[in-house]
Image: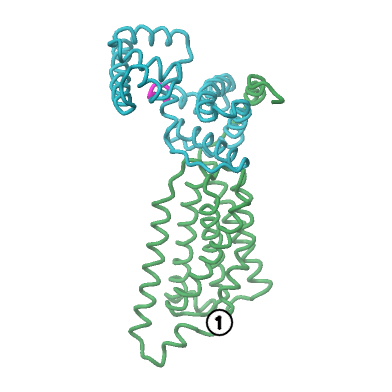
Chain colours: A cyan, B green
Amino acid sequence: MTETEAALKALMLLSLDGDAPAYRLLLSQLGGRLRVYFERRMRDASGDVEDLVQETLMAVHTRRATYDRAQPFTPWAFALARYKLIDHWRRRKVRVTLPIDDYVEVLAAYAPEPGSAMDLDKALETLPERQRNLVRDVKIEGLSLAEAGDRAGVSEGAAKVALHRALKSLGERMRGRADG
Amino acid sequence: MAVRTDDLIDQLAARPRAIPAGAVQRRFVGVAVAGGLAALVMVLAWLGTREDLAQAMTGRMFWMKAIYTALLGVAGFWALERLARPDGAPRKALLFGALVLALFVGMGFGQWLAADWEHRRSMMMGGSWKVCFRYILTLALPGLAATLVVLRGMAPTRPALTGFAAGAFAGGVAATVYGLHCGESTMVFVGTWYTLGVLGTGALGALVGRWALRW
């Protein structure tokens, strides 16, 4: 997640100086993450996902002067996405509340480049089987914690704790690999 | 969906204009100058400056008033600089504004309570309490409108609070300019009526902002 933030922020700083290739890369990287973010929150209206991705990318473009270079990039971009999502629901008269920092899981789950997906597979293999299945079920197949818990035969709460531990050790393993 | 997302990205990334650092602050400074000038023109052409202006400017109270209202405007500016961003946290700015207000109003009422009973009414009401609120609000309207227009191009996600900050910002600037016309010289008068003028502009900003600041 922090690597993603560092990369996206670097691209954003280049973009603000007028670097077109960096900007194109930033928008497409961000677009993929936004798609995951909206898909997870709009299972019942998946036809609108691409519209929201585009609306958010437009907002990033026209309102990019409001990005503060001293601050991290992803909270800024996903605050725009969250506003667009709430606005979308408001227009459809649905009242919801969204936590401000829930995009973090998207960044954690998103693995766009084939290289890093392979690394992820390798790192997954090193986890105990139960943890590995849990990560696959929730983070890759997109099951809810309750569903994944049912599969593994544990409660939702236990699944949540186990998943947290699994992601933590997975992160440590992948970092270890990058350092070594 | 009319466009493919990849095509949209190609369009947006075709020739990105460079954005200078501090673009947000610069725009609000521009608005403050424009709003201040508009208020100045209204004072000169409509209300007139106070007759003893040159002499008053050598006194302490003239500057106390100006510094108080200018600081309220600064608090509004600071809050806007945060609220114009989708993830901006305005807490410190709002706290600063509340502190400035509480300090000045507290000192004003302290003086007022310490004064003789028969002076209190004239200290509080002065000669212009009926028009003070209305004049400050009117002088602030051009600045408020300009601030809201600028904000619509930014990314505020809390429309009512952002509108309030816009009003406090424009109201602070206008009240400072209004000091060129208004001859009142007690702290309790300024603490009451000027404060109401600035907060009233803030309330108007919040009301308008609720629908004007959606994007």
Q: Percent from the top left, x then y, of residue B184?
A: 50, 80
Residue lying at 44% horizontally and 8% vertically, measured from the top left = A115
Which quarter of the rendering shows the C terminus of chain A? top left
Residue lying at 64% horizontally and 75% vertically, measured from the top left = B47
Residue lying at 63% horizontally and 19% vertically, measured from the top left = B6
Q: Which residue occupies the extreme right position in the image?
A: B2
Q: Residues within 10 Å of mark 1 (few under 14, many from 20)?
A: few
Q: What's the amino acid at mark 1?
A: Ser
Q: Percent from the top left, x then y, of residue B18?
A: 58, 31
Q: Quadrant of residue A100?
A: top left
Residue B203 position (above or below residue A70): below
Left or right of B23: which side holds A10? left
Left or right of B167: which side holds B41? right
Q: Which residue occupies the extreme bottom position in the image?
A: B118
Magenta span includes A2: yes
Q: Chain of mark 1?
A: B
Front residue (pair A163, B161): A163
Front residue (pair B68, B167): B167
Front residue (pair A133, A114): A133
Numbered-mark total: 1
Front residue (pair B182, A25): A25
Q: Which residues fall within the magenta stretch?
A: A1-5
What residue is pinned by disc 1?
B128
Residue lying at 37% horizontally and 62% vertically, measured from the top left = B99
Q: Percent from the top left, x then y, of residue A131?
A: 31, 15
